[in-house]
Image (tube, rainbow, N blue to C red):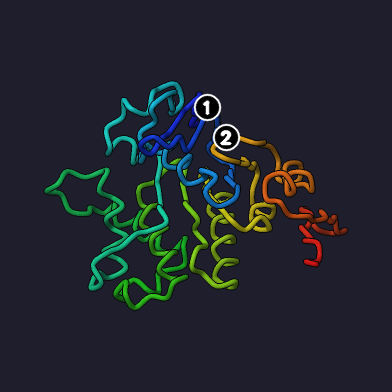
Amino acid sequence: MEIKAQNIEIAYGDYLAVKDMNILVEKGKITTIIGPNGSGKSTVLKGLTRLLNYRKGSVYLDARNLKEFSAKELARHIGVLPQMHSAPPDFQVKELVSYGRMPYQKWYERCNEEDQRIIDWAMQATGVWELREKSINECSGGESQRVWIATVLTQQPEILFLDEPTTYLDISHQQEMMRLVKKLNRESGIGVVMVLHDLSHAMEVSDWVVVIKNGKKYDEGKPEDVINPRMMREVYDVDCDIINIPGREKPLIAYREIS
């Protein structure tokens, strides 16, 4: 399965936020969208998932235009976790996670045995099984983020879209989130598309990186090829060295001293 955007443009009123964008994301890969604040990263992600309308161009899921899918049908293929999300505070974790099965149910149906099996799997895969009886408002920031990912996973998507999944998390929980993303991808074959600010995380977990600058695609490729000193200067206006360390699969980003 793949999602392909061809020459899409997205605007907010008169402001053209994304210009002539071509992107291909594939099931089984971790694709990360990076770029400075305000460059259009989240807008691109929303365009790829039909959360925003594009005024020009097309987005295809395999060979079929995204606009041809019903909401329920599309939710069986792609799962989206936006930056902001909320649930009634008295909801138990297991109740919230069960809502991810809605694309497979009629409005009057309850969870059947198969639904429950998938709900249990999603809670175990994300490490929230022990939290299932807790209210969502009793969960920490890191726990809550994993609960929401479990909710999206119960849709059984082929590609999971995460918009800045480490926002508001401390360093420990950021690392935990990246380990979870990698685990889900490697063990379940789920494609992942993320918007990230932390370039070290992008370097460490991504198979493919797309760089956005001023609403346009600046570059794309393997993270170790794309995240380089020239890109850092031209896109982020910072100086750095990329250091290869024996025994490490991915290089490290060493930012120059601030003078």
Query: 87 left or right of 110?
Result: right
User: At 55% from the left edge and 28% from the top edge, which residue is drawn?
Assistant: 22
Q: Is residue 170 left or right of residue 103?
A: right
- Residue at image location 47% in from the left, 51% down from the top: 162
Res 52 label = none
Tell me, for residue 20, which label it has, or none. Answer: 1
- Dot 2 falls on a residue whose secondary structure is strand
Q: Residue at x 48, y 31 (%)?
A: 3
| Horizontal and vertical percent position of residue 71 | 28, 37
Tell me the crowding category of disc 1: few under 14, some 14 to 19, or many 20 or more residues within 10 angstroms, Cα based: some
Residue 137, position as x, y percentages in the image: 31, 75
Please name the amino acid that badge 1 sits on. Asp
Query: Seen from this angle, which residue lies furthest left?
Result: 108
Q: Which residue of the protein is positioned furthest toward the right in this rendering?
A: 246
Do we see residue 39 in this rendering?
yes
The residues tagged by marks 2 and 1 sit, at their Cα atoms, a distance apart of 7 Å
Q: Residue at x 59, y 50 (%)?
A: 36
Which label's residue is closer to the chain start, 2 or 1? 1
- How many numbered discs, if any? 2
Image spot of residue 105 (x, y percent): 21, 45
- What amino acid is at disc 2? Lys
- Which label is found at residue 216? 2
Q: Are marks 2 and 1 in contact (CB under 8 Å)?
A: yes
Q: Is residue 13 above or below residue 177?
A: above
Specify the quadrant of the image occupied by residue 75. Answer: top left
From the image, which quarter does the C terminus lie in? Answer: bottom right
Q: Residues within 10 Å of mark 2 (few under 14, many from 20)?
A: some
Q: Nearer the viewer, residue 50 or 184?
A: 50
Q: Is residue 173 left or right of residue 68?
A: right
Q: Is residue 121 visible?
A: no
What element does badge 1 sit on? strand
